[in-house]
Image: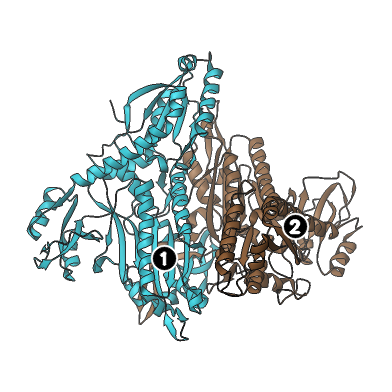
Chain colours: A cyan, B brown
Amino acid sequence: MKNALRVRRSENFADWYQEVIREADMAENSGVRGCMVIKPWGWAIWEGFQAKLDRLIKETGHDNCYFPIFIPVELFEKEASHVEGFAKEMAVVTHHRLVNKNGKLVPDGELESPLVVRPTSETIIGEAMARWIKSYRDLPLKINQWANVVRWEMRTRIFLRTSEFLWQEGHTAHATREEAIEETRQMLDVYRQVVEGSMRIPVIAGEKSPGERFPGADETHTIEAMMQDGRALQAGTSHFLGQNFAKAANIQYQDRDGGLSYAYTTSWGASTRLIGALIMTHSDDDGLRLPPKMAPAHVVIVPILRDEAGRDEVILAAEALAKRLRAQRYDDEPVRVKVDLRDDSGANKRWAWIKKGVPLVVEIGPRDVAAGTVAFVRRDAIGTKRSASLDEFVAKIGDELNELDQKLHDDALAYRKANMVEGLANYADLVEHFEKKGGTGFVVGKYSGDPMIDAKLGEIGLTIRCLPHEQSGSEGQCLVTGAPATVDAIYAKAY
Amino acid sequence: MKNALRVRRSENFADWYQEVIREADMAENSGVRGCMVIKPWGWAIWEGFQAKLDRLIKETGHDNCYFPIFIPVELFEKEASHVEGFAKEMAVVTHHRLVNKNGKLVPDGELESPLVVRPTSETIIGEAMARWIKSYRDLPLKINQWANVVRWEMRTRIFLRTSEFLWQEGHTAHATREEAIEETRQMLDVYRQVVEGSMRIPVIAGEKSPGERFPGADETHTIEAMMQDGRALQAGTSHFLGQNFAKAANIQYQDRDGGLSYAYTTSWGASTRLIGALIMTHSDDDGLRLPPKMAPAHVVIVPILRDEAGRDEVILAAEALAKRLRAQRYDDEPVRVKVDLRDDSGANKRWAWIKKGVPLVVEIGPRDVAAGTVAFVRRDAIGTKRSASLDEFVAKIGDELNELDQKLHDDALAYRKANMVEGLANYADLVEHFEKKGGTGFVVGKYSGDPMIDAKLGEIGLTIRCLPHEQSGSEGQCLVTGAPATVDAIYAKAY
């Protein structure tokens, strides 16, 4: 059977990725440099993600709030290490007016001091925390915001790296180091629950090496996923900031003994790039494949209306089936069903929904109505059109969705296992492995912690993705330096 | 009884408003000019509003999506009338980098062409619509986005007028004028449903006079509310844009006959200023009063823990009551209950929740536990502490919330009726009325449509709020020009 996409995943992964997005009508590049338009199908997936993550953020005791989009440049000046690290490429607002000069609009009304469009909000939230926190009674302070942020990226790729992106950023302050570290780890686990449990993207949780840490963090924890080209994608990070930001922002509190102490802070974020991860983990040469928990529609019903005879009966039967399905529940919510009544052929409509990744596409024609049956395809086996009685189909909807859910996870996990290598002896092996395999896959090897390692890996386009929380504890030699080492690390190329 | 706030509504309305917000801990001004921090209590109210409005926007067939925050200045140049009207004061991004010069961070990397932080998105969405709409089959196109927007306001007031604010903006394109006008009116009614039905703010729906229209609109419709100082607040607007924006953005489609036609477009928005309207409509000298449908917590239970004896029993009883209440439903959702276990006195906690506007504050002490009773106050009658058996209280929770809901609406409606005047004879009367009453209230009077009216009213700080959709049809004389007129208008000072 001919594939629905013009580009095969195996031929040109980057083009295939763009094609999946275009054919699923999820998003597009805008006329504004590096900024994307997220279209309804892409947005509905993001809304589903937001709802799941937001619930867990609230269940773990965080309150949502909202901070200004603009950050005074002076706040960044306080944060020298922060700025050195990554924050130099930022959108800078310098004027507050446009005036018409000979038909051209030009900036006017220069600001006394420039404002930065937030690349992240540690600085401005730190300033608020310093005002809000007076005593140990005010701790822990656990807040989160859903917001747009801007980082002026030179090379952009839709969802994965865009100048403007959407995310949530959590910021907390604690009285003790232990409690802050526990928070950091807890929120990483919250990300894991959503990314692995709902998005069905297998991840490896671990700590970043010092060279890969968030600037100013004492520890950065991450969940790392493998895309279908073998490259790693960081799917969520959680930072233990120690007292570094508290000292810069003067977040001090009166402790139980009456003394003044600096708080320990954390921050953690997950962004629209996860939609890119979802696409690159599950899609195939026929387009997007959506894990059922992330699908804006679980079932799309396509009435087959070849001629006027029987038209009303078919539409009525489709609507009746939709109603019965919506009375069923999946993932603690009613089953989501669309009936596609657009003016187009059944085949075109079926392909459109397959490319959009809908778990089950159902067809009902006049003969189905007469026989009380439906024909359907499941997104992991679109070559197999199956038939079932209406009752059977309704009764088994949960099973079908569960099986697909499991299948997508199993496929992704099998791919990762097949592309994960252990037992390389030394740096020459590491270099050869990535040259031979065209730069893909994860290598598990030892890491000595030598500060030069990150730079040396950078020369050949590799990074340490993480030092997994699950460690073997075995002894060996660092893959880069050859020094004796016990820590396991994941070496990979990354998005 | 002493009031909870230091400022009385009747003494200084503007200071009282700030005090309500501060004491309810809803929001605060940030260090960034004109931008606010929305704190958890304020944000939870906004989230409740979003959920209600978003559901209606989807039920009326709109899809959410997301457009870039930056708009190229060239798009505004196309929109001359738009820019003349209101869009000159905007945040302009001119650089994409900050560099460190002698310890100061200064803008670097000048953009070839400046970008504007969106003040509204007609231009950039119009550009997308021009690409997306090719044929009549692509119509209607009905989209919405929840976003932050920036208008560089000279005088700001928290929630009511801030440089950055949050809103939704709906944008639709239609094949016919009639359909677009119907959409415009439908979405105004959606706003009315939420603002009047859930926020319990009585509104008058009507059309704006030409001088008050959105620049570039053929018709602007509005719902207007009266605040407790008699001033009007525009609580949602819906614009019929005719073919004006379609022509500027070249939104053309192939019609059924194969010809090319311009689409008719609409846009409509409601913003965080509605939170300001909620505050100014319902609050009193004891702080915020929340209509139950907008309350993040319907009930707060304060365990009275004077000494250690009986402490565990009281907390258990409080949690048990919370559980029973959460099993009840109100407004199609479980009743929202908090148990306040913070380390503070019962009286302090009760006042804190009263100032936050919680509908019912319940106290349970050791004697209540022994007797199986609770003591409670309802926010509209905090001077009356009532007692009920646990069973009674649980059984009547819906009734109590309904009564409060009705009471707040009735109070607001009664205030509006008491401050609405008809039958003034002429302009001298109008001027005298507003001078005498200190510039408050609504005057219903005739309006001839003369273009000079808006400017003349502006001289005395008045505006025409709307020409109500419900018209008396009577004949009379224009309150400003004295000319014969049949159209009723609302004259008022406004936020």
Classify mark 2: helix, strand or loop. Answer: helix
Circles 1, 2 touching at the beta carbon (< 8 Å): no
Q: Mark 1 points at which residue?
A: A120
The answer for which chain carries disc 2 is B
* Quadrant, the C terminus of chain B: bottom right
Q: Name the residue under label 2.
A: B408
The answer for which chain carries disc 1 is A
Name the residue located 47 percent from the left edge and 86 percent from the top edge: A258
Give left or right: position of B450 versus B186: right
* Quadrant, the N terminus of chain B: bottom right
Name the residue located 39 percent from the left edge and 21 percent from the top edge: A387
Residue B221 at least partly seen: no
Amino acid type, label 2:
Leu
Dividing the picture into quadrants, the one containing residue B358 is bottom right
Vertical placement of A357 versus A90: above or below? Answer: above
Vertical placement of A405 versus B493: above or below? Answer: above
- Residue B143 x %, y %: 54, 44
Towards the viewer: B352 or A89: B352
